[in-house]
Amino acid sequence: MPYSITIGESAGNILHEISQQEKTSIQTVLEKAIENYRRQSVLTQTNRAYAKLRKNSKAWNEEIKERRTWENTLPDDLEDD
């Protein structure tokens, strides 16, 4: 579903400049920017959740214990790069 938005002149100029440099459309620049923003948001939320988990020593110790359990399942006889 297409959307129509209004942006300020400064942002429009920046989008135009980037699209010219990248030799792509403004729509593509916006779509990439939105995806990057979404990914950054996921990482920020994940970091906050881990910070909260680390404040609870019992829960954090359980997390570490579970990680160690999973680490034991990883050996696959492949050499590290």
Image (cartoon, grey):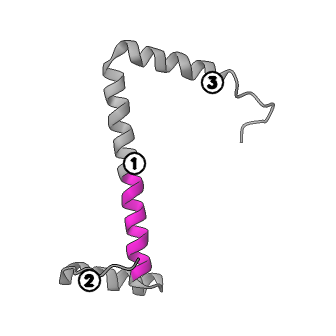
At mark 3, the secondary structure is helix
Placement of 72 over or under 32, stated as above or below: above
Category of crowding for the residue at label 2, using alpha-carbon neighbours closer than 10 angstroms: few (below 14), some (14–19), many (at least 20) = few
| Mark before the other along the chain sequence, 1 or 3 | 1
Q: Mark 1 points at which residue?
A: 42
| Mark before the other along the chain sequence, 2 or 1 | 2
The percent position of residue 76, horizontal first and vertical second, equals 78, 31
Category of crowding for the residue at label 1, using alpha-carbon neighbours closer than 10 angstroms: few (below 14), some (14–19), many (at least 20) = few
Was residue 38 drawn as part of the magenta stretch in this picture? yes
> Residue flagged by tag 2: what amino acid is it?
Gly
Spatial separation of the CA atoms under disc 2 and disc 1: 26 Å
Spatial separation of the CA atoms under disc 3 and disc 2: 48 Å
Q: In which quarter of the image is residue 57?
A: top left
Q: Mark 2 points at which residue?
A: 12
The percent position of residue 78, horizontal first and vertical second, equals 79, 35
> Residue flagged by tag 3: what amino acid is it?
Trp
> Residue flagged by tag 1: what amino acid is it?
Val
Residue in the picture at 36% in, 25% down: 53
Q: In which quarter of the image is residue 56?
A: top left
Q: Which of 26 and 79 is in front in this view?
A: 26
Placement of 55 over or under 12, stated as above or below: above
Residue in the picture at 37% in, 66% down: 34
The percent position of residue 28, horizontal first and vertical second, equals 44, 78
For this orientation, the residue located farthest to the top is 58
Residue in the picture at 32% in, 36% down: 48
Q: Mark 3 points at which residue?
A: 70
- Stretch in magenta: 27-40
The percent position of residue 58, horizontal first and vertical second, equals 38, 12
Q: Quadrant of the C terminus?
A: top right
